[in-house]
Amino acid sequence: MKVAVIMGGFSAEKDVSIKTGEAVVRACLANGFEVYPIVFDNNYKDSFQLLKGVDIVFNGLHGTFGEDGAIQKWFEQNNILFTGSDSFSSQICMDKIKSKKIAKENHIRTPDWIEFKENVDVNQAFYPCIVKPNAQGSTFGLSYVNEAGSLEEAINHSLAFDSNVLIEQYIRGREITVGVLNNEVLPIVEILPKHKLYDYECKYTPGMTNYKCPTELDNGLREKINIDTIKIFELLGCRGYGRVDYIIDNNNNHYFLELNTLPGMTSTSLLPIAAESSGISFDDLIKKIIHLGLKQ
């Protein structure tokens, strides 16, 4: 089988994407695939003939262009098979505000929020809160704010990454994530960062975060979370695989945060941790994702 692995891109997550791509390339080689690694840049269309000549493209991009539906749309227009969700679903999931609205409309609890715009009265904000770019990953531009005097600086920090900013109620509690593979949930991972927030350093530096998988949860709560995970995965039109992030408060209420359609595949990434816990090796996980993409 011929597999092109695309990575890099031109978002703030380029370096993370390259780590994902390199890990995927190794797994593809271990599976006996004929692999074509491609580091994308602004001249991605130069790879058109190569991409048309493979059986499938493994999308290892993260962030803008790779995860927001843009490259997916280009693949669809050119009849190129690729892994992960389609352009429509990718665009919705990358837009945190849009996906939160869909969750709320369908009775899935999510933290309250306001969208920062020129005419928004920031006095409406609630404290403490999380300020983050609306369409960005890997916690780029994210800040914890506990008083009004720090809000403007946090907003400006987020604006460096996106023109839309999400000001979200901070929920104190346990941070968990649920991987989805072929519309089935994987064991729940609890995230225990050394910092107050699960920030970039904690995400990508070995030893900066501990993970419990499967985590200890009441069976009733676990079932509710799993049901909501598949529900939001299907509501947002996702396919193949993904990862849904939640916060569980002190009253055992779980709050939907976002759905990641292209989870990282680095040594510290959460989806591979969940897969490993269910007996799926990293090489097998990549093979399963590729075969799911071939069925689309």
Image (cartoon, helix red, strand yellow):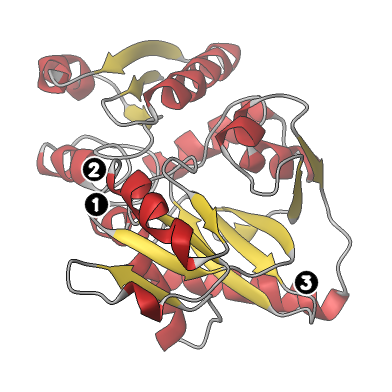
Q: Measure the C-alpha gap from mark 3 to mark 1.
A: 30 Å
Q: For the residue labelled by badge 3, is the local secondary structure a helix, a strand or a loop?
A: helix
Depth check: 162 or 21 in front? 162
Q: For the residue labelled by badge 2, is the local secondary structure a helix, a strand or a loop?
A: helix
Work out whether 210 lies above or below 54.
Answer: below
Say which mark, if any, is on residue 222: 3
Q: Position of residue 144 (x, y in %)?
A: 55, 55
Q: Position of residue 98 (x, y in %)?
A: 32, 70
Would residue 8 appear left or right of 214 to someone viewing this image?
left
Work out whether 111 lies above or below 257.
Answer: below
Q: Position of residue 16 (x, y in %)?
A: 47, 26
Question: Residue at horizontal 28%, vertical 77%?
Answer: 121
Q: Which residue is mark 2?
A: 72
Question: Residue at horizontal 28%, vertical 25%?
Answer: 9
Depth check: 83 or 210 in front? 210
Identify the mark nearer the N-term, 2 or 1: 2
Question: Residue at horizontal 67%, vertical 30%?
Answer: 268
Q: Which residue is mark 1?
A: 87
Q: Measure the C-alpha gap from mark 2 to mark 1.
A: 5 Å
Q: Amino acid at mark 2?
A: Gln
Could one spot residue 216 in this view of the protein?
yes
Crowd band around label 1 with a 10 angstrom C-alpha radius: few (<14), some (14–19), many (20+): many
Question: Residue at horizontal 28%, vertical 48%?
Answer: 159
Crowd band around label 2 with a 10 angstrom C-alpha radius: few (<14), some (14–19), many (20+): many
Q: Amino acid at mark 3?
A: Arg
Identify the mark nearer the N-term, 2 or 3: 2
Say which mark, if any, is on residue 95: none
